[in-house]
Image (cartoon, helix red, strand yellow):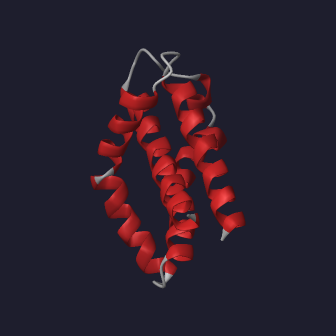
Amino acid sequence: MATVLLVIGAVLLISTFGIHSCILESEIDNPAYTSNPLLSAIPWISGFVLPVIVWAKITEFHWIALFFINLGVVRILGPLLTKGFLIRFASGKGLGIDMVTAFVSGIITIVIGLVIQ
């Protein structure tokens, strides 16, 4: 059960980065956080760093190898995961709210998975 929660959390964090990429492409829906470099780094960390910690906790691979594997996962599966997340869980209030929802849900799911494990 803990492994499933950790995988779901990693997928949600990858979706956070994907939604951030959609926000940067959109000229209409541009939240205020995109002007702040510190806040704009949160999706990059949640897409590329935090899932590596989860994958390292689940598997026995070295974290550097998992980082490069995660780069491919984010690049190839990221748009598909984001599209699936937005189709099923979009709030209709903008991509910024959807990104925060994915980020918070991913963090909560990972924390629950780590506590159960």
Is residue 50 or residue 31 the one in the foreground? 50
Is residue 97 or residue 24 the one in the foreground? 97
Q: In the figure, is residue 41 to the left or right of 89?
A: right
Above or below: residue 88 compared with residue 39: above
Residue for point 61% across, 30% down: 33
Residue situated furthest right in the rendering: 115
Residue for point 56% across, 23% down: 31
Residue 45: image location, x then y, percent: 56, 54
Residue for point 57% across, 60% down: 50
Above or below: residue 18 compared with residue 8: above
- Count of numbered marks: 0
Above or below: residue 15 compared with residue 117: above
Is residue 117 or residue 84 the one in the foreground? 117
Residue 6: image location, x then y, percent: 55, 61
Residue situated furthest front in the rendering: 1
Quadrant holding the C terminus: bottom right
Quadrant holding the N terminus: bottom right
Q: In the figure, is residue 112 to the left or right of 58?
A: right
Residue for point 63% across, 61% down: 113
Residue 97: image location, x then y, percent: 57, 26
Q: Quadrant of residue 76?
A: bottom left
Residue 68: image location, x then y, percent: 38, 71
